Image (tube, rainbow, N blue to C red):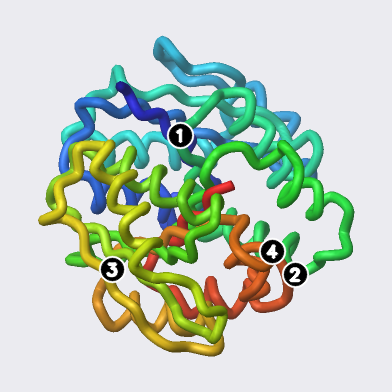
Amino acid sequence: MNKHFLVTVSNDYDHLTGVEFICSFFKQFSEHQITLLHISRLDAADMNKTLMKMWDKPEEGVTGPLTVGARKALEKSKRLLSKSNMSIDQMITKTFPERYGKIKDILKEGASGLYDAIILGKRASYTLQWFFERPADETAKAIIQDSSLTSPLWICPEPEQGRKHVLIGVDGSVGSMRAVDHVGYILSKQDQHTITLLHVENGAGLDSDAIFQRSARILNDHHIGDERIRRETTWGINVASTITSYAEKSGFAAIAVGLDGVDQGILKRINLAGGTTSGLIERAEKISLWCCP
């Protein structure tokens, strides 16, 4: 089955971190489709002029007008993806002016397109961080708790070459099992990556062996053999710090966690939906964070 990713592209063509991550992470793109999304800022001084500037030779699959900055960024994105064994005919580009705020626009597109993941680069991540640091804001609550966020969200800082493998924080909850299922689906044919199931003991008294068994069965259903699955248990009061420290020391490329877990969810327990978001994103400077609703 083809996997379809929505990759956000800003005007800053020097920092296409979402594109750079998937180029470094995937071995082959034979079963992938990429939609490159650019949203023009409402306050762009030259918007009226540049929104009407189209490609000299529009390609099939390009929808909407393209800004000058978007054109440069999208051209570079396509070059990077082409070097990663992805042919141009597997890419679609979309662009439109900001409507309801950039993050809400991204999530609306993600919901309407039935994407397997929404991939945000560094600039988009900073905007997302701004929303999450205001938990009382009704818009942020709608994004986190309601149907606006229907696809897994990957927050991708600048990747570090050589990083491999995915770490999943598991606590036996429905949310963490969805994270396991997402990783299994994404990595089913990417056998260059192993998957580490990490359970953080913090006094909750959960059965780690049972959690690992359930998780492994889900991964096996995605044709991931036991030789690719690692199981680790560690102790930590601060779950966020424990997970990120473990991932950083071990050189993981990505951390996957569920938005809903035991005791209101692993992400809520570590306060990812609140003020520590900035600390988590800043600490994982070279690691992609996959948030699975």
Instruction: Inspect the image, locate mark 3, and give the three-letter code of the amino acid beneath it.
Output: Phe
- Rounded to the nearest whole Å, what is the CA distance between mark 1 and mark 3? 21 Å
The numbered disc on residue 133 is 2
Q: Secondary structure at mark 4?
A: loop
Residue 276 position, x and y percent, is: 65, 78
Instruction: Out of 227 and 34, give the one closest to the viewer.
Output: 227
Which element is circle 2 on?
loop
Task: Specify the label residue 252 is tagged with.
Answer: 3
Q: Nearer the viewer, mark 1 or mark 2?
A: 1
What's the residue at 15%, 53% (across, down)? 226
Q: Secondary structure at mark 3?
A: strand
Crowding at label 4, few (<14), some or many (≥20) Cα neighbours within 10 Å? few
Which numbered dot is residue 264? 4
Q: Earlier in the sequence, mark 1 or mark 4?
A: 1
116 relative to 21, above or below: above
Q: Do the residues bearing badges 2 and 4 touch, measured as CB atoms within 8 Å?
A: no
Foreground mark, 1 or 4?
A: 4
**In the image, is 158 to the left or to the right of 171?**
left
Q: Which residue: 35% across, 41% down? A: 76
Query: In the image, what residue type sits under mark 2?
Result: Glu
